[in-house]
Image (cartoon, grey):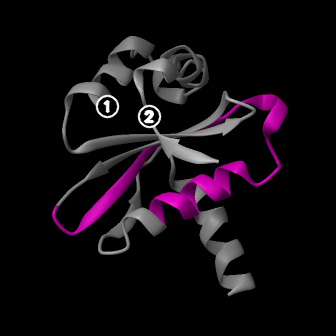
Amino acid sequence: MMIEYEPCHQEGVMLLFSDLPAVHTGIPVRQLLSAYEVLPERHLYVWQHHEKVVGVIGIHKQKQTFAVHHISVHPSFRNQGIGSSLVHGVQELHLHLAMCSTQETKNFLNKCWQKQSLLG
């Protein structure tokens, strides 16, 4: 189930963020999370399974669009549709905005959009 990030999710989100390419290029996990906690245009959503955070998606809202900046699913829960469900969930929450990707999320979002067009 996808819900909005709350401080009680911090430990799980930091664990998932530690697997992101941005962290491997030197951006501290705490700095990534802090941007979502303090900037009003940044929004973070988590996917919970039995109250454990197993997925996370972070977006940056603008006037007419929102960009998916970060998405991560715990390795034990990958290939189960959680990432696609997170993408679909943020699309549903922000129907009035066009979704776009970043360099980091482009490949994953392209896969999601291809699946949607095949099913649609």
The numbered mark at residue 93 is none
**Residue 49 in which image quadrant:** top right
Query: Does the magenta portion include 72?
Result: yes
**Looking at the image, residue 114 lies above or below residue 70:** below
**Residue at position x 59%, y 64% from top?**
110
Question: Along the line of sight, which residue is nearer the eye, 4 or 104?
Answer: 4
**Residue at position x 35%, y 54% from top?**
67
Q: In this view, does 33 lie to the left or right of 90?
A: left
Q: Is residue 22 visible?
A: yes
Query: Does the magenta portion include 38?
Result: no
The numbered mark at residue 5 is 2
Q: Where is residue 98 in the image (x, y as percent from the top left)?
A: 34, 71
Q: In this view, does 41 lie to the left or right of 69?
A: left
Mark 1 residue type: Tyr
**Looking at the image, residue 98 lies above or below residue 60:** below
Q: Position of residue 94 (x, y in %)?
A: 36, 65
Depth check, mark 2 against mark 1: the one in front is 2
Q: Name the residue under label 1.
A: 36
Do callouts 2 and 1 mark residues in contact (Cβ within 8 Å)?
A: yes
Over which residues does the magenta segment extend?
Answer: 63-91
**Lower position in the chain sequence, tag 2 or tag 1:** 2
Q: Where is residue 18 in the image (x, y as percent from the top left)?
A: 56, 18
**Residue 53 in which image quadrant:** top right
Q: Can residue 26 be seen in this view?
A: no
Mark 2 residue type: Tyr
Q: Kindly state the secondary structure of the residue where label 2 is placed.
A: loop
Q: Kindly state the secondary structure of the residue where label 1 is placed.
A: helix
Quadrant where the C terminus sits is: bottom right
- Graded by Cα atoms within 10 Å as few (under 14), some (14 to 19) or many (20 or more), the crowding at tag 2 reads many
Question: Along the line of sight, which residue is nearer the eye, 103 or 97?
Answer: 97
